Amino acid sequence: MRKIVVGIGGSSGSIYAKVLLDKLAQAQTQLTAVGIVMSDNAKFNWEYELGNKAYKEYDFDFYEKKDFMAPFASGSAQYDTMIVCPCSMGLMARIAHGISDDLITRAADVILKERRQLILVPRDAPYNLIHINNMKVITEAGGIICPASPSFYSRPQTMEEVAATVVDRLLDLAKIKQSTYRWSE
């Protein structure tokens, strides 16, 4: 059983967050807790890109970005995995440099200090040297950088299927069992 925090950052790519939440909802028997924190820009982008406010309909525990009383703001709550999807470069920079100015960055800091699993999903491209150095800092601190780079082996037909090629990789990294396309299987 896993306890997962999902931070939804404000970069474009709300489809990735939606597919992630959909798949976590399907995997709830493997999860004891799912905490969600969305930035203001994440909510705006979801509404703009997906044309709805469906993020309000998920049966997860949602926390405001300044709610430092959320359980995963402390290592004692023992959340084992945090996925930030999508992760803007500004959010990544704050995480890389320990600037815990909201609940997403505080939770990421806690996950790293407790030596648990932090997975960041940058969607921006191209990268400049500052971005690459921030990725290096996070990787050296024990985090995983999993860019939102879809694969096409499974011949996805819809935007959600394309996004799922990235999200399925995230679920594998988070050790959540799933049925998905596997190369040569």
Image (tube, helix red, strand yellow):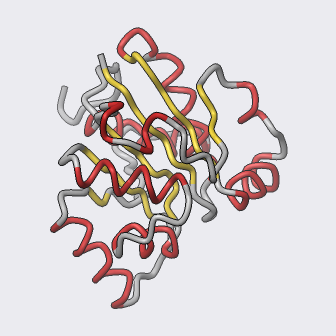
Q: Is residue 29 above or below residue 166?
A: above
Q: Is residue 146 above or below residue 18?
A: below
Q: How many marks?
A: 0
Q: Residue furthest bottom?
A: 129
Residue drawn at (46%, 64%) of the image:
100
Q: Position of residue 47 (x, y in %)?
A: 81, 49
Residue drawn at (84%, 46%) of the image:
51
Q: Position of residue 171 (x, y in %)?
A: 34, 34
In front here: 88 or 65? 65
In front here: 170 or 35? 35
Q: Is residue 58 above or below residue 17?
A: above
Is 61 on the left or on the right of 136, as rendered? right
Residue drawn at (33%, 50%) of the image:
110
On-image quarter of the N terminus:
top left
Q: Is residue 124 above or below residue 143?
A: below
Is 97 on the left or on the right of 25, as rendered? left
Residue drawn at (61%, 44%) of the image:
159
Q: Position of residue 105 (x, y in %)?
A: 46, 59
Q: Position of residue 80 (x, y in %)?
A: 28, 34
